[in-house]
Structures are given as C-alpha cells and as structure tokens.
C-alpha cells in the first residue's frame, strides 16, 4: 500500500532530481509498477473505508424507526425488549449506536443560541439559590435557607443575601442588600417566574412597587428560559462548588459573613469570560449608571393585629410577648430580619420589641411584660369579694313539698 508520503517522495525524485524509475526503485524498494502508477497519478492515493459487514440489527432497523416515530424518547432498554420479541439476538452496543444516529431525526430540533453582549448598567440578573445543607439557627435547630443572588452581566460582579423564605418581603430584602453591596442601580432587573415575583409571567404588585420606588425596569423571562440569565446560572454552580464545599457555618450570621467575604474575593479576580478584573469593570459600570438612593425601599413585613387576652404574638412559628395592659387593642407589627416590634395604633405606645429568632417552637417573654402581668393578676386577687346574701336551707325546704 503506497502512502501519501511515499507518493510525494517518488514524484519529487522523478521531477526534481530527474532520477529514472530504476534508480527510484533501487532507493525506495517500491515495485516498478507502483512507481509507474504513482508518476501517472496527479492525485495522492486515497483508500476509502471498507464496506460495512452485515449486522444482526439490519433486519430490525425499520421496527426501530416505527418505535421512535411513536415515542421519540423511548429508552434503549424498552426498544431492545420489543426487538427481542421480534427475534433480535444481538447485543445492546450496536443498538445504542444506532439509536444515537436515528433518535435526533424524530426529536424536536434543538434550540440554538446567539451570543449576547451587555452594556454597562443595562441589567442585573436575580435568582434564588438553595444551599446544599440547612443553616444552623440556634437552639439546636437548623432551617432551610435561600440565597438571593445578583449578578451584573457586564462586569460579572456578584452578591448574595441569605433569607429563610420565598415571601416577597424576604426576597425584597435580599435584592436591596445585593444592590447596596454592588453599589449599582441598573436599568432593569431580570427575574424568572418566581412565585413572589411574577407567577404566570405577570409581575406582582409588590414587585412593581419595589421597582417603582427605585425607578427600575424589569424583565420577566419566559417559562423554562433560565438560559436567558446564564451568567448567573453559572455563578450558582460556582457558589456550590467553590463557596459551600468544605466550609462550616456556625449560624446564619456566620454564613452571611463568609458569603460577603467570598463575594469580595471573587469580585477582585480576573473573570475567565471577560478576561478583565471584575472590580475594575464594576467601577466603570458605576460611572455610567444612576447612583443608589440614600434610602432604599422599606422591606420589613408589616401587619395589624389585636392583642389577645393571652398577650402573645405568633410570628414565624414563635410566640413573642406583648404588653398585657394593651389587651383588646390593635397594634401594628413590624418584622425585620433582626427584630420584631409592635406599636399600639391609637396611642403610639410600644407594645413589644424582641430580637427575631429563626428557630421554631419558641416563646419569648419580656421581663417587663411578665412583671406587669403579675401585677395585674395580683390586683384581681386583692379585690374584695362581693357581699352575697345567704339564705338558710329551711326556706328552700318550705318551697319544695315533701
């Protein structure tokens, strides 16, 4: 078999060195007929693939196509079971090789993507990322948490905030904290169809109010279109593999402290995609966009309730004491990420203030409330008993005949 290298060498000896075919034969050892054919052919030798040998699967290709036409995602195991019922005795390797060739013909065409370029301050992508393990919240308990994540696609600057629910007040707190950490106010916020943000693709009033206070636009992605915020999705994998892996967290404050430090470190690196230092591009981005307002929107949870006869307030699975002198009166409750306060609506009196706990099944009693409750109970005990007339039992005997 004459290779391309030998073919080229024979032609060089003949046309450049002007050697005879006999001399070429002596130097190369190639048969003279082969040398003659090489000199006569202007194209290099090529040897096509050998003809394919018959396979045990060949008689069943039509049956495989019929099965894929009915159910394109039918597993190879099921297809092999059907073929064995038809008499197939071959192995699974040749069947799976055939399926890799045939199955794409019956599946919907795959989606194609175009490269996206971002302008400074154009977008901020937001999402929720669930830590791989529960977070310690004290009292020997752990709780499922979520990280509100934010990334600016132009600079690739990243920030995150730990929350413990998917309610909008907690998500809004996470968004405000991330924007404050990044020091940037983009043109639009990008969210998927999160239940508290845009269930069914329609933004909630609470989310619209948040954007309106900051004069921001919004983009709600189509269902199943997480690729539209692919920069943040890749950062989620980085968060799990680089931040969480090998770390221990004493409590939620320690988790947030370590997360902030990790974000500062990755924002100081050279990003693999942009080939630029993230912090430098973030500084460039801050120059071209609106600065953050001095006061961010209030994200505390507020509601009105009435002080029960047993003066405790149930919030987030815990009971917090209220002033017992305000029983029956309405109070406005304000719950932040750090404390819970209640104020009487008609007089403005403080009904209670407690540090918020994220563990569950606990009761918190303010010592001042307990003292007041003891005093009120003591006053009730010290009240004189009413003078009640006592009639002799003989009077009742007279009224009841024997």
Image (tube, rainbow, N blue to C red):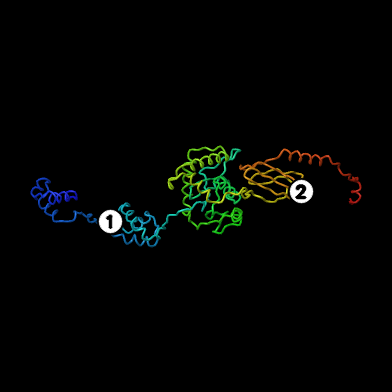
Q: Nearer the viewer, residue 117 or 374?
A: 117
Residue 134 placement (x, y as % from top left): 54, 42
Residue name at image x 39 percent, y 62 percent = 70
Residue lying farthest to the left in this orientation: 22
Residue 165 placement (x, y as % from top left): 58, 48
Question: N-terminal of the two: label 2 or label 1?
Answer: 1
Q: Is residue 219 left or right of residue 296?
A: left
Q: Is residue 58 visible?
A: yes
- Mark 2 vs mark 1: in front: 2
Secondary element type, mark 2: loop
Residue 288 placement (x, y as % from top left): 52, 51
Residue 343 versus residue 70 in the image, above or below: above
Q: Residues within 10 Å of mark 1 (few under 14, many from 20)?
A: few
Residue 3 versus residue 379 in the image, above or below: below
Q: Which residue is mark 1?
A: 56
Residue lying farthest to the front in this orientation: 287
Secondary element type, mark 1: loop
Q: CA distance from mark 2 to mark 1?
A: 90 Å
Q: Nearer the viewer, residue 153 or 371?
A: 153
Q: Is residue 43 left or right of residue 133?
A: left
Q: Residues within 10 Å of mark 2 (few under 14, many from 20)?
A: few
Q: Which residue is mark 2?
A: 347
Q: Is residue 313 left or right of residue 113?
A: right
Residue name at image x 54 percent, y 41 percent = 260
Residue 280 versus residue 86 in the image, above or below: above
Residue 111 placement (x, y as % from top left): 42, 58
Q: Is residue 75 left or right of residue 390?
A: left
Q: Is residue 1 visible?
A: no
Q: Quadrant of residue 255?
A: top right
Q: Nearer the viewer, residue 274 or 366?
A: 274
**Mark 2 and mark 1 residues within 8 Å of each other at the beta carbon:** no
Marker count (numbered): 2
């Amino acid at each position: 078999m004459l290779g391309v290298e030998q073919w080229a060498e024979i032609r060089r000896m003949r046309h450049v060195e002007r050697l005879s075919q006999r001399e070429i034969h002596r130097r190369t050892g190639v048969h003279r007929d082969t040398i003659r054919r090489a000199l006569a052919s202007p194209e290099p030798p090529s040897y096509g693939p050998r003809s394919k040998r018959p396979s045990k699967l060949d008689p069943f290709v039509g049956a495989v196509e019929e099965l894929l036409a009915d159910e394109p995602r039918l597993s190879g195991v099921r297809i092999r079971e059907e073929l064995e019922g038809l008499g197939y005795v071959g192995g699974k390797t040749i069947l799976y090789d055939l399926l890799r060739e045939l199955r794409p013909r019956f599946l919907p065409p795959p989606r194609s993507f175009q490269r996206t370029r971002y302008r400074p301050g154009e977008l901020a992508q937001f999402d929720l990322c669930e830590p791989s393990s529960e977070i310690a919240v004290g009292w020997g308990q752990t709780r499922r948490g979520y990280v509100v994540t934010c990334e600016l696609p132009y600079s690739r600057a990243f920030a995150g905030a730990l929350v413990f629910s998917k309610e909008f007040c907690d998500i809004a707190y996470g968004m405000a904290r991330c924007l404050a950490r990044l020091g940037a106010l983009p043109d639009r916020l990008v969210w998927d169809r999160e239940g508290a943000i845009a269930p069914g693709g329609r933004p909630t009033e609470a989310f619209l109010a948040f954007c309106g206070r900051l004069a921001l636009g919004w983009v709600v992605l189509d269902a199943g279109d997480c690729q539209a915020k692919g920069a943040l999705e890749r950062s989620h994998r980085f968060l799990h593999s680089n931040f969480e892996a090998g770390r221990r967290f004493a409590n939620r404050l320690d988790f947030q402290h370590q997360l902030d430090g990790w974000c500062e470190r990755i924002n100081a690196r050279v990003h693999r995609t942009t080939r630029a230092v993230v912090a430098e591009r973030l500084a460039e981005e801050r120059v071209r966009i609106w600065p953050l307002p001095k006061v961010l929107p209030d994200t505390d949870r507020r509601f009105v309730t009435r002080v029960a006869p047993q003066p405790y307030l149930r919030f987030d699975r815990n009971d917090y004491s209220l002033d017992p002198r305000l029983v029956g009166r309405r109070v406005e409750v304000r719950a932040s990420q750090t404390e819970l306060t209640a104020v009487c609506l008609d007089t403005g009196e403080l009904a209670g203030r407690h540090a918020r706990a994220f563990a569950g099944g606990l009761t918190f009693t303010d010592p001042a409330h307990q003292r007041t409750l003891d005093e009120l109970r003591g006053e009730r005990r010290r009240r004189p008993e009413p003078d009640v007339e006592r009639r002799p039992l003989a009077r009742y005997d007279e009224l009841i005949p024997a």
